[in-house]
Image: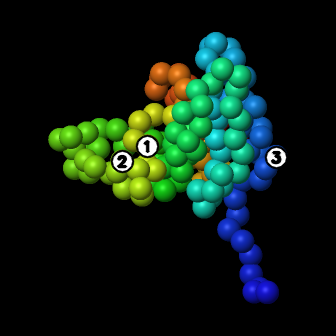
Amino acid sequence: MANGTVLETITLEEAQQVIDAAAKKAAEIGQPMDIAVVDAGGNLKAHARMDGANIGSITISINKAYTAIAFQCETGDLQEATRPDGPIHGLSDAHGGRLVVFPGGIPLVRDGRIMGAIGVSTGTIEQDQEVALAGAGAY
């Protein structure tokens, strides 16, 4: 076995706290959500599909979190640059279509380091972003 350490990342307990805070906000606004948390490598750490959330949004929530890690920014920040007249139009087709370039994905940062990301989907993009912000705020 190799000596060394694994990249520091969000723990399962922290991921659950993020999901719980996001789910609380989703309940407050009356919109069930799919909520995903990925680790610093973009791998799924935890996911919750609230009762009534769209099945089709499971993958979208995971991919929003992945995109936030892959580009180290909120997914909504990619929206303008990826429009048809934008400098990186077509980016959403990269990675086998896994990238999501609209709001709802936010990096989870501790001490200036990205430790994971949250992705939220099922509501409007404004609702997704609001719920993701609530989850990220718990981290």
Q: Which residue is mark 3?
A: 13
- Which quarter of the image is occupied by the N terminus? bottom right
Q: Which residue is mark 2?
A: 92
- Which quarter of the image is occupied by the C terminus? top right
What residue do we see at 70% from left, 64% from top? 8
Name the quadrant containing residue 84: top left
Q: Which residue is mark 1?
A: 100
What residue do we see at 40% from left, 41% from top? 101
| Residue 29 x, y percent position in the rendering | 62, 14
**Helix, strand, or loop for circle 3?**
helix
What residue do we see at 58% from left, 27% from top? 54
Looking at the image, is 40 positioned above or below residue 124? below
| Residue 118 x, y percent position in the rendering | 61, 42
Spatial CA span between label 3 and label 2: 31 Å
Name the amino acid type tagged 1: Val
For the residue carrying disc 1, how many other residues have a C-alpha within 10 Å: few (<14), some (14-19), or many (20+)?
many
Looking at the image, is 94 positioned above or below residue 5? above
Are discs 3 and 2 less than 8 Å apart at CB? Answer: no
| Residue 64 x, y percent position in the rendering | 51, 43
